Image (spheres, helix red, strand yellow):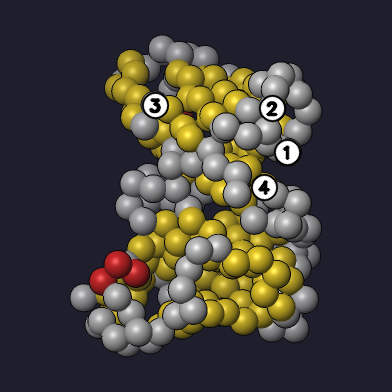
Amino acid sequence: GQQVMQIPQYQHVQEGEDFTTYCNSSTTLSNIQWYKQRPGGHPVFLIQLVKSGEVKKQKRLTFQFGEAKKNSSLHITATQTTDVGTYFCAVNTNAGKSTFGDGTTLTVKP
Amino acid sequence: DAGVTQSPTHLIKTRGQQVTLRCSPKSGHDTVSWYQQALGQGPQFIFQYYEEEERQRGNFPDRFSGHQFPNYSSELNVNALLLGDSALYLCASSLKSNSPLHFGNGTRLTVT
């Protein structure tokens, strides 16, 4: 089945610095979803990308889907303490199963 | 509009025991998926229920079973508990099989 690998596993930044997490696959992905899980919380859906080369923005967050649909990235501009948490990418198959990466945990030093 | 609700929030069981976890989907959702999340890892897909039937299953043994009721709520049952079953169990609902997942707060299961 489709597998996704996320890097880095951890990222520590100073408040105001930028942050990027990457999601990679050896196979072509039908779509990619991004979720955020706050410490002690549950995953919350952020966005879904479907088209090759797609770029979507949500305020300070920019999501990209690679041209070959084998990788994706999430970039946060000027991080804030409210951005702390673990960011997961997930691929959803047509059969309904979502496979998650192991996430990138972001900590922000004020 | 209630989101996904799960019960109980925490549970402590002994090896060999059986456990039942419950989930009510978000209003309007008809598909329920269960995930196991170990500490420091991403959610691992257990199975998905739609129209009261198991539609998809992940790499979990038969000790893990489930059920979906006519009102779309769902149960996850785990028999013969092992220490390694200790994890956060997340229920997620969706309207269609490939639409975004809405997660509940999870049930934290500890097996001693």
Q: How many marks?
A: 4
Same chain letter for marks 2 and 4: yes
**Which part of the image, by quadrant, shows the C terminus of chain A?**
top left
Horizontal side, residue B66 vs residue B107: left or right: right
The chain letter for the residue carrying disc 2 is A
Give the spatial CA distance, label 3 vs label 2. Answer: 20 Å
Going by the numbered disc 3, the residue's amino acid type is: Pro
Instruction: Confirm or deny contact between disc 4 and disc 1 (CB under 8 A).
Output: yes
| Left or right side of B39 for A55 | right
Residue at x-position 76% and y-position 24%: A52
Q: Are marks 1 and 3 on the same chain?
A: yes
Query: For the residue carrying disc 1, how many other residues have a C-alpha within 10 Å: few (<14), some (14-19), or many (20+)?
Result: some
Which image quarter: residue A26? top right
Q: Is residue A57 visible?
A: no
Q: Residue at x 71, y 78 (%)?
A: B53
Q: Give the percent coordinates (x, y) of residue A46.
A: 62, 38
Same chain letter for marks 4 and 3: yes
* Mark 1, residue position: A30
- Up the image or down, B55 lies above or below B100; here it is below
Q: Earlier in the sequence, mark 4 or mark 3?
A: 3
Badge 4 or badge 1: first in the primary sequence: 1
Circles 2 and 1: CB distance less than 8 Å?
yes
Residue at the image point whose x is 32% and y is 87% from the top: B17
Q: Nearer the viewer, mark 1 or mark 3?
A: 1
Tell me residue A91's x, y (percent): 63, 43
Up the image or down, B92 lies above or below B99; here it is below
Distance from disc 4 to disc 1, alpha carbons, whole Å, reads 7 Å
Q: Quadrant of residue B31?
A: bottom right
SS state under label 3: loop
Q: Which mark is residue A8?
A: 3
User: Which mark sits nearer the N-terminus, 1 or 3?
Assistant: 3
Identify residue for label 2.
A69
